Image: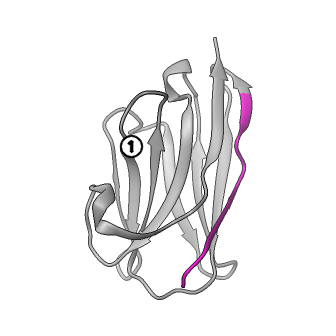
Amino acid sequence: QVQLAESGGGLVQAGSSLRLSCVPSERAFSVMGWFRQKPGKEREFVARIVFNTDDTYYADSVKGRFTISMDNAKNTLTLQMNNLKPEDTAEYSCAAGFYNDVTAAKYAFWGQGTQVTVSS
């Protein structure tokens, strides 16, 4: 069973930056992504990366502010979040799967989630 270990959440002010990390226990998949869930809302797609091409894709709400990347040497997926806004407040989860998709149901493995809170 693949396990994904996340870290890096916290409480920051608007305009600040945070970096989330996710370390998979093994690399038995081809796509990794980040999703977030706000209170009372459904989980939403944030960003994803395809390993064999390094192709990335972002939700419009984070495009230009967030960057997803995979450090193969450290086996670590990161989400660099810049110019954070209060509306970015959510629980962020990394996910891994086999399909190039933005739908949460297409991802087979999930981390436990890390809270990001952005104050105004």
In the image: residue 47, left or right of residue 117: left
What x and y, as percent, mark residue 111?
Answer: 57, 62
Which residue is at the front of the view, 83 or 100?
100
State the count of labels.
1
Q: Residue furthest front?
A: 40
What x and y, as percent, mark residue 32?
Answer: 44, 68
Identify the residue at image location x=29%, y=61%.
105
Quadrant holding the N terminus: bottom right
In the image: residue 46, left or right of residue 79: left
Identify the residue at image location x=54%, y=22%.
85
- Whether the magenta-drawn stretch holds residue 4 is answered as yes
In the image: residue 74, left or right of residue 45: right
Quadrant holding the C terminus: top right
Up the image or down, 55 lies above or below 88; here it is below
Q: Where does label 1 land, which residue?
A: 43
Up the image or down, 23 lies above or below 88; here it is below
Which range is magenta? 1-11
Q: Amino acid at mark 1?
A: Arg
- Whether the magenta-drawn stretch holds residue 7 is answered as yes
Identify the residue at image location x=55%, y=81%.
2
